[in-house]
Image (tube, rainbow, N blue to C red):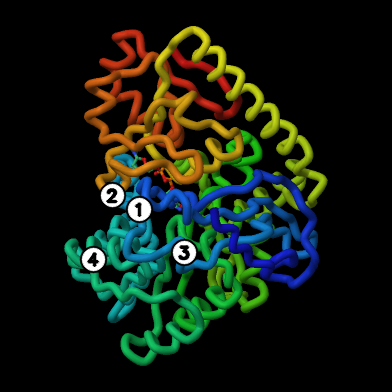
Amino acid sequence: MMTSIQKESLVCRVSGKKLQQTLNLGIQPLGNGFLSQRDFKKEYFYPMATGFCSESKMFQLLEQPAPEKMFHDQYAFYSSSSRHMQNHFEKFADAVLESRCLATADPFVVELGCNDGILIKNFAARGIRHLGIEPSQNVAAEAQKHGVRTISEFFGAALAEKILKTDGPADVFLAANVMCHIPDILGVAQGINNLLKPRGVLIFEDPYLGAMVEKASYDQIYDEHVFLFSAHSIQYLFGKVGMELIDLLPQNTHGGSMRYVLAKKGIFPPTPAVDQLMAKEKLQGLDRAEGFAEFRRRVEKSKGDLVALLQELKKQGKKVCGYAATSKSTTILNYCKIGPDLVEYICDTTPIKQGKYSPGMHIPIQPYEHFQKNPPDYAILFAWNHSEEIMAKEKEYMARGGRWITHVPEVRVIA
Ligand code: DWN
């Protein structure tokens, strides 16, 4: 076991002030570090805990593995693995076009972390000048197949300069489920501000801190998610580079996300949604470290309840599998110490994960067809954020008496 720990961040990555610990999820491997048996001995682990900064209001990991460990040419997550997400991003693109922020002479749209092109391909297909930035080469290659112009580099002020020289300033800068992955978020914010036209807008969405706290969905915390944002933290971060929130739109994706719309300060009047959400966050306690005490208690209870349920099912001789080898499942399995003795296998539709083992707890990952041929008595819904889509396609499993286990918002069996 390797525990190469980076001590870079017991202070806030944005304000530089000391962090207060909010949650400790123990020693964890990489969320997407699916591995072969021969690599068990050299598996990478690090201590995963979160902290809160009372100045920037940033909820963040105390320590995070180096980006190169997580995002590389074997990156295991392809955004288009969910049909629901494909529809979501088509609608996202339509909303950008309807907002008329691309209604300029020669519009230019940039997307950070475009993955397999799920969002930006909708602009490419309309012949709009665009650029996708995606450091993981394997998923970037997939985006190129969809006609997306991509570069495989990490974004910051230096890359912004380069793009300004080759393409000029951007009308719209997009990101989805990306910003929360970036430790040098201030450098990225600076780069975005530099790259945008004076009336350019930044539109991005990420899992929302308020939704995670409400649902006790602590599995949103893993190596890749260095931050879980709120309106408070986004306002502080972008305020540092001369930008401000002008709108907020809650999304039901990934278990509760927020779409943030920002522009340079003073250009567009903010909608009432900005003040409304800031007020709600204060009530929810998202603006102070003490506000996370109840969340911590619910997470600890969730662990106890899930382990007790699985042990009871084992005693009864029931067969339990995991449904979808999500990054989130890595957090749950390693925090609760759930291994192949309690969960026989995890099925997943992504070929790169199949035939491998889950990070840390080493549960075999089987192709989806294995689930159909060997249906369990109970399946833990690790992709609970896609539950509607999954329930719709698993009617036969349920009709035959198959049951689901979920931990959101509390551990329970769904018949
Ligand atoms: O931010 C991130 C989010 C957006 O996506 C990344 N850091 C990584 C990833 O997180 P995740 O792995 O928790 O994402 P999902 O979308 O909840 O899960 C995707 C996985 O689930 C894929 O491996 C495919 C699998 N899956 C499946 O096997 N059957 C998904 C669906 C919908 C299914 O029906």
Considering only order in the chain, which callout, 4 or 1, is on the residue closer to the N terminus? 1
Q: Where residue 352 is drawn, which disc sits there?
A: 2
Residue 76 numbered tag: 1
Mark 4 and mark 2 lie on one chain; the one further toward the N terminus is 4
Q: Is residue 44 above or below residue 192?
A: above
Question: Badge 3, how many Cα within 10 Å: few under 14, some, many 20+?
Answer: few
Residue that sits furthest to the right in the current view: 290
The type of residue carrying mark 1 is: Ala
For the point 39% across and 61% down, which residue is it? 99
Residue depicted at 67% across the width and 75% down the height: 240
- Residue type, mark 2 in image: Ile
Q: Residue at x 30, y 18 (%)?
A: 375
- Relative to 224, say whether 243 is above or below: below
Q: Are marks 4 and 2 in contact (CB under 8 Å)?
A: no
Per the model, the C-alpha gap separating discs 1 and 3 is: 12 Å
Query: Quarter for ligand 1?
Result: top left
The residue singled out by tag 4 in the image is 141
**Of marks 4 and 2, the one in the foreground:** 2
For mark 1, give the secondary structure: loop
Q: Estimate the x, y position of residue 28 in percent, counting from the top left.
A: 57, 48
- Look at label 4 and name its amino acid: Ala
* Residue located beneath label 3 in the image: 69
Mark 1 and ligand 1: say if the CB distance to the nearest ligand atom is below 8 Å. yes
| 329, 269: nearer the viewer | 329
